[in-house]
Amino acid sequence: MTIDKITELLGADAQLLLNHTSKTVSKDIIHLPGADFIDRSFIGSNRNPQVLRSLASMYNHGRLSGTGYLSILPVDQGIEHTAGASFSPNPIYFDPAKIIELAIEGGCNAVASTFGVLASVSRKYAHKIPMVKLNHNELMTYPNKYDQIMFGSVEEAWNLGACAVGATIYFGSENSNRQIIEVAQAFERAHELGMATVLWCYTRNDGFKKDGVDYHVAADLTSQANHLGVTIQADIIKQKLPENNGGFTNIKFAKSHPKMYSELSSDNPIDLCRYQVLNCYLGRIGLINSGGESKGASDFAEAVKTAVINKRAAGQGLILGRKAFQRPMNEGVELLNAVQDVYLSNDITIA
């Protein structure tokens, strides 16, 4: 996809995003993505050689191989959002093999899914860079509750041939303390076995909405969630793209500093995302942003916009699922490739 097509998809936001020069955190002090990222960021860490090999297998797979960027297909929505709601738009994805096929045909670095999905096809696809999602929010409890519970063990993920494990923590939720302990212990064990770790760093609390504004996607709240995620040694952080800021000050909780808002971020989406990168140890741990729900015709434009923001902020890629698998496979492949083209484009640089 050419820069002209990317510009066309960005529409009215093209000028704001493509020509922005960040004056918050200089790219000169960030651990930037690149072919040598693992050498620069992990060689001196406590990660053992098997973890480094697992990370390398992800970063050096698919269309983005060797670039330092990641395109991951996540399909755990069968549990998180019910299988019917997730797969009815395209019922072929009730079949686990089709999920893996989409990731392969789409040129992804990895596919993240459930124990059941990956177990049902593991002998055929274990070498195709699977990532097992360890915990989920099951949606069958009535009334619904929001909690992440373990669905299997790290050892089982290793036996499936996974190169990485993923998990979610709902930071700020009633059960977040237990989740932090469980996931920290699981990640420690995964590293012992040589697997990489990816953390879905989501915020969750009814109190994070105030005066009609949803601060679950505020740059300050999501960035602190990132900082907690890298603290428990996640190798890659998954986070929603920030949509606003000032959660701490408007909700009036936790602690903040005026420079968080006046100097380290701005109203530009790229700078809001860069503050997320800052909280991932200044990019030493890669930030990938989520693709979000499918809205139909606008999916291509929204996915490309998210990729441009993430790349220009010094993020490392996208983890995008519903926009791809809730449409015909050929269109899903095209959408995944469009996102990857943003990271492959020399015309889109880090701001």
Image (cartoon, rainbow, N blue to C red):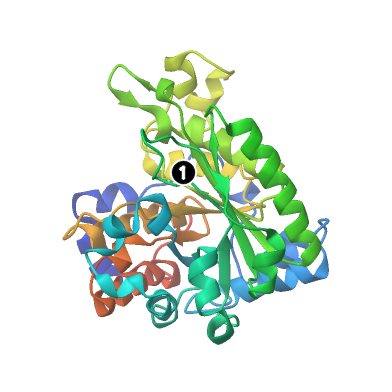
Measured along the vertical axis of the image, is residue 122 above or below residue 145?
Answer: below
Q: Position of residue 256 (x, y in %)?
A: 57, 20
Q: For the residue carrying disc 1, how many other residues have a C-alpha within 10 Å: few (<14), some (14-19), or many (20+)?
A: many
Q: Position of residue 112 (x, y in %)?
A: 51, 65
- Residue at the disc numbered 1: 273
Residue 198 in sight here:
yes
- The amino acid type, in three-letter code, at marker 1 is Cys
Q: Residue furthest bottom?
A: 124
Measured along the vertical axis of the image, is residue 36 above or below residue 85?
Answer: below
Residue at x 25%, y 63% (from the top left corner): 300
In the visual, does 280 lie left or right of 96?
right
Q: Position of residue 207 (x, y in %)?
A: 42, 20
Label 1 element class = helix
Residue at x 66%, y 51% (from the top left corner): 234
Residue at x 39%, y 45% (from the top left corner): 140
In the visual, does 299 lie left or right of 313?
left
Residue at x 45%, y 36% (from the top left corner): 146
Q: Nearer the viewer, residue 252 or 200?
A: 200
Residue 1 in sight here:
no
